[in-house]
Amino acid sequence: MSKNLWLVVPAAGRGRRMGSDVPKQYLPLRERPVLAHTLARLHRAFPAARLCLCLDVDDDHFDPAWVPFSHWRRTPGGSERVDSVRYALAAMADSAADSDLVMVHDVARPCVTQTDLERLYIALCEDEVGGLLAAPVADTMKRDDSHGRVARTESRCGLWQAQTPQGFRYGLLRRALDEAAVNGLVVTDEASAVEALGLAPRLVPGRRDNIKITHPEDLALAEHILAAQQGMSPLNHSHEEAP
Ligand SMILES: Nc1ccn([C@@H]2O[C@H](COP(=O)(O)OP(=O)(O)OP(=O)(O)O)[C@@H](O)[C@H]2O)c(=O)n1
Ligand SMILES: C[C@](O)(CO)[C@H](O)COP(=O)(O)O
């Protein structure tokens, strides 16, 4: 692994769709907070990477004991995910080179596997633009008529669901996100900002179980995914090795 790999983990969300008093990154999943699982999986794949962890300035749930990286820093969250990522990139300016690879991964995706992380990393090292894990859309897609009825069926051909990590060279990613901000573009992921520069990020097929914990039912789903990935019952927590 290159020594110039940076990980940015946006973890400053409030989890409004989860509807919990505690932000979803601190909810328990197999007896550890979601955040601890996500960081453990990233560390297992990239133990020498440098981490920027974006946390709300008022976060009083965070415990540094959950961070397995030796080189890491805490950076402030912004009002939107993209703002949190931009603050992290700005904080790295003193030590990151434009050619360094930056992989951004949602704290809310604790089920990402080591195999997918390593495959993405290899693809990104060979790609001049960068790219993201993504999964082809698997369901029939309906467009609504704004009144709860089907207006038409859309073709799913060529449609992918964007996941994270998403990885780009530091200089390119910073320019892309800065330009998106200047132009008032709403970007919900890094790839959209890079696309707005006229570039085409690489789609790296990822496992469908790299879910983003978003709604209450996703937590139970993540429990089952982690258990299934580890080849065991969801009630048996004794073995924590990820695939
Ligand atoms: N201002 C924000 C908003 C989101 N995130 C992070 O971005 C990721 C993806 O966001 P999402 O799933 O939308 O999380 P929340 O914003 O927490 O959820 P919601 O939109 O339901 O409030 C999460 O890891 C979240 O912590 C962040 O760092 N800063
Ligand atoms: C980055 C992301 O995880 C890709 O799917 C997603 O765009 C962020 O979450 P949101 O639900 O769109 O805010």
Image (cartoon, grey):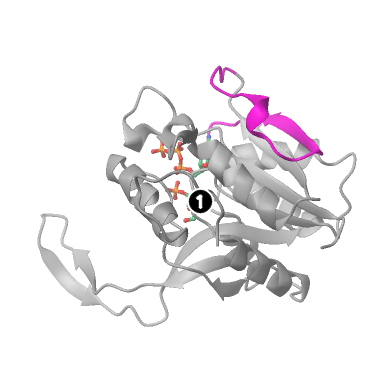
Q: Is mark 1 within 8 Å of ligand 2?
A: yes
Looking at the image, which is closer to me, 99 or 109?
109
Q: Magenta span has 61?
A: yes
Q: As drawn, is 142 to the left or to the right of 136? A: left
Residue 8: % across, % down:
68, 45
Q: In this view, does 58 lie above or below 220?
A: above
Q: As drawn, is 75 to the left or to the right of 152? A: right
| Magenta region | 58-79
Mark 1 lies on a secondary structure that is: loop
Q: Quadrant of the C terminus?
A: bottom right
Q: How crowded is mark 1: few (under 14 residues within 10 Å), some or many (20 or more)?
A: few
Snapshot quadrant of residue 100? bottom right
Q: Quadrant of the N terminus?
A: bottom right
Q: Main secondary structure of the magenta part?
A: loop
Q: Is residue 200 above or below residue 39?
A: below
Residue 12: % across, % down:
55, 32
Q: Which residue is drawn at 9% across and 62% down?
A: 149
Looking at the image, which is closer to me, 38 or 167?
38
Snapshot quadrant of residue 215? top left
Q: Which residue is drawn at 11% across and 56% down?
A: 148
Residue 76: % across, % down:
66, 28
Q: Which residue is drawn at 33% across and 37% down?
A: 17
Q: As drawn, is 65 to the left or to the right of 126? A: left
Q: Identify the residue position indicated by label 1 in the image.
A: 188
Residue 222 appears in the figure: yes
